[in-house]
Amino acid sequence: MNPRDIVAKLRSEEYRALAENFLSLSTLQVLVYVIPLITLPYLTRVLGVANYGLVNFAIAFNTYFQILTDYGFGLSAVREISVNRDDPERVSEIFSSVMIIKGVLTVVSFSMLLGIIMTVPRFSANWVIYVFAFGLVVGSTLSPMWFYQGMERMKYITLLNVLTNLIFLATIFIFIRGPSDYLYVPLLQSLGTITAGLISLWIIRTRFNVRFHLPPWGVIWEIFRDSTQFFLSRASVSIYTSSNSFFLGLFAGNATVGYYSAAEKLYTAAQGLYSPLLQVTYPYMAKTRNKAFHRKVLRYSMILNTVLCTFIIIFAPHIIRLLFGAGYMPSAGVLRLLAVALMVVIPSILLGYPFLAVLGQQRYANGSVVVGSLIHLAMLLAVAPFMSIYIVALLVIITETIVLSIRVYGIKKHDLW
């Protein structure tokens, strides 16, 4: 076999693995967002706007704890596992360290939740729903998707999530019968994620032969410290995305959260279409730094995104009426504004960690969202006295434009394109 044939073979195997992981992630992502689209029309009608808003407020509030327990490992641990995947001892060390850190942060988070429930009337009045929603934090801690991404073996987690999501789909229609059943929504979601997490840990132990142990304190501290910069960035993104529903709940009431959350669910689902691409591209680019490949990904993604956003803007009222019912029509205007934000978000995401960070300029990827988060929170506080769902959606457009501008500036300044 001549050198050209060897190179061709290696490249075909390389891209085959990339394609396999992309397919697995795409299947998982479609499932993650299709199932809510099946349950949403049912839940929004059965629960009513106010109770649906309360459920989303509780989940948005617990997202802050999810941010803390993740601590940026969705990026840093993926990179470390990807680089060291051929060293079983190092992989076990990384895995054990991350799980220990996440476990400690989960205990800290639950203690904080109990403190808030006991001291703040807004939360003590409905304390059960916040405790049930915290199960999503526990499930996130137990679900090491970062490990499977780093190993580029996403088929396991995909099959597992298919099963648990189908079970969740069935339980929603079985147990949610009226407005008073709103408490069961976060409980059922939590039980599904916790079950998936436990099984995924068992797969890691049996299929990948990863041993959980107590690494030296210095190793744990190093992994914790190295992930801090990623935590600050991811926390900034999550805080300004989760804070919209949270601030609306504080200043405008549960019904307003219901209207905004309906549109935001679709906005998040549209972003999720590109998540497999991001999750596959990041470890691949971390290894290869293939700029030509990334330029093609960005070009075709922007074309697809323009078509998708145009469709959403034109048919927003019909989409809202079909999925949520006539009682949610105020959400149509919000959906149109968020579609404009989506035009900015997708190129911004693809230029962030899969490009700037892997090329050694992660300060722009991280710094852009930190700046955007601070500006967004400041704007939310400024508009609090007259906050509305439409104003919040406009703030999202402004914030995402700022984030994209900073990233483009970094690329031009260092001549990376």
Image (cartoon, rainbow, N blue to C red):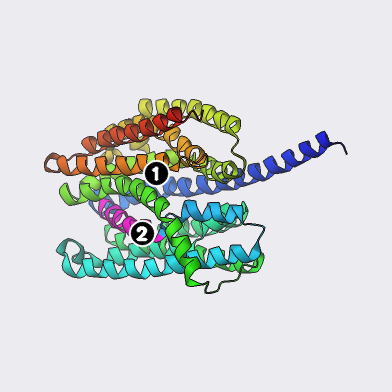
- Count of numbered circles on the image: 2
Q: Which mark is residue 8?
A: none
Q: Which residues are magenta?
A: 53-69
For mark 2, what is the residue?
A: 68
Tell me where residue 404 appears, x and y as whole percent. Answer: 38, 33
Q: Nearer the viewer, residue 232 or 18?
A: 232
Q: Determine if residue 417 is in view.
A: yes
Look at the image and tell me in which quarter the N terminus lies. top right
Q: Which mark is residue 366?
A: 1
Residue 311 picture quarter: top left
Disc 1 crowd rating (10 Å Cα; few below 14, some 14-19, many 20+) is many
Q: Secondary structure at mark 1?
A: helix
Residue type, label 1: Asn
Tell me where residue 77 appears, x and y as whole percent. Answer: 51, 56
Residue type, label 2: Leu
- In the image, residue 155 above or below residue 364: below
Of circles 2 and 1, the one toward us is 1
Residue at the extreme bottom: 214
Identify the residue at image location x=55%, y=29%: 295
